[in-house]
Amino acid sequence: MRCYVASKAKHAVFWRALRGAGIPIEAPWIDAELNQPGAPEARPDQWQRHWQRCIESAADADLTLFYAAEDERQCGALLECGAAQPKSFFSVWLPFGPADFAACAVDL
């Protein structure tokens, strides 16, 4: 099973921790250099390649997890969710904080 995650880049640490715990997360953006704190501004061609990889990965996912904090404005994550919809058999929309995720047992 391939799991894609969509949220703001500042939540990448949380998603990497879940991946480290064994959840099969495949989302190139959580490891992308251009999303790291302090990274230099990416060139347009770098963003283009980045988004192509993200959209393709989302489209290939079996499960999509989306997280949006109450005070966040979503843009790219919504595009990823849209790309995932035709194939993902189940999408989870998480309108609460990462600390609350433990309350939602997902058996992968």
Image: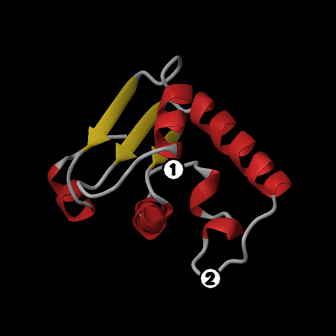
Residue 53 lies, in percent from the top left, at 72, 44
> Residue shown at 56%/27% (left/top)?
83
Q: Secondary structure at mark 2?
A: loop
Q: Secondary structure at mark 1?
A: loop
State which quadrant residue 98 falls in.
bottom left
- Report the residue at 57% width, 78% height from top: 37
Q: Is residue 22 above or below residue 38?
A: above
Residue 55 on image: x %, y %:
64, 36
Taking the spot 41% from the left edge, 47% from the top edge, the residue there is 74
* Residue type beneath disc 2: Gly
Amino acid at circle 1? Ile
- Residue 50 visible in the snapshot: yes
Residue 38's disc number: 2
What residue would you read off at disc 1?
A: 25
Other residues around mark 2 within 10 Å, as few (<14) / some (14–19) / many (≥20): few
Q: Position of residue 26 (x, y in %)?
A: 58, 48
* Residue 1 in view: no
Q: Who comes first in sequence, dot 2 or dot 1? A: 1
Q: Quadrant of the C terminus?
A: top left
Residue reaching furthest to the bottom: 38
Asked if 51 appears above or below 29 in the picture, the reply is above
The picture quadrant where one finds residue 14 is bottom left
